[in-house]
Image (cartoon, rainbow, N blue to C red):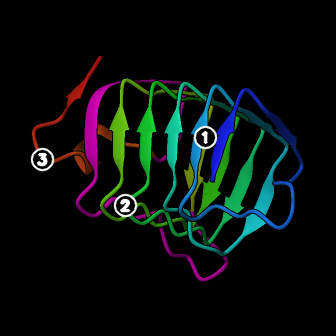
Amino acid sequence: MFFESQQFDTRLKKPFGWSDNVFRYCDFAHINAEGGDVDSVFVSCTFEKCDWYWGIFNLAVFVQVKFTNCTFRGTAFSGSKFIECEFVDCEFTLDNLNSECSFEDVVWYGCIQKNCKGLAIQNTSNGSTWR
């Protein structure tokens, strides 16, 4: 499904989920999600004050997306791509089993992070660029 210029506050509109969708110019705020797969494409979207617990972002694509005051607890970003994204005041923390967020095979290109905790440059060992 294709979503354009929509506002999502606290949750997605049912029956749609985070899989196999394209979101363009959408704003997400106060989303609190536990578990679940996210493998959609996000273009020029914003995420503000969202909280993911045990999220599984497998092969998700983010292009020119801004994350502000978001928390990711024990979240896996396997094979995801972040192109010209910005992370501001975000936290990547442990889950209740003391597992860190994982960034296996993630591609970062031209991304910016400001005042983030747990999103270390050393997690980007594939030669990706940060500004």
- The answer for how far apart the CA atoms under marks 1 and 2 are is 15 Å
Whether 111 is drawn above or below 32: the answer is above
Which disc number belongs to residue 23?
A: 1
- Residue that extends furthest to the bottom in the rendered view of this protein: 97
Vertical arrangement, residue 65 with respect to residue 79, above or below: above
Three-letter residue code for mark 2: Leu
Marks 2 and 3 sit apart, C-alpha to C-alpha, by 16 Å
Kind of residue at badge 3: Asn
Residue range in magenta is: 94-118
For the point 37% across and 39% down, the residue is 82
Residue assigned mark 3: 126
- Residue 75 screen position, x and y as percent: 53, 65
In the rendered structure, the answer to whether residue 72 lies left or right of residue 29 reads left
Secondary structure beneath label 3: loop
Quick one: 90 or 13, which is closer to the camera? Answer: 13
Front in this rendered view, residue 27 or 103: 27
The residue that disc 2 covers is 59
Give the residue at x 82% y 67%: 15
Residue 14 highlighted magenta (yes or no): no
Question: Which residue appears at 64% of the width and 74% of the height?
Answer: 36
Q: Secondary structure at mark 2?
A: loop
Q: Earlier in the sequence, mark 1 or mark 2?
A: 1
- Mark 1 Cα shell of 10 Å, populated few (<14), some (14-19), many (≥20): many
Disc number lying in front (1 or 2)? 1
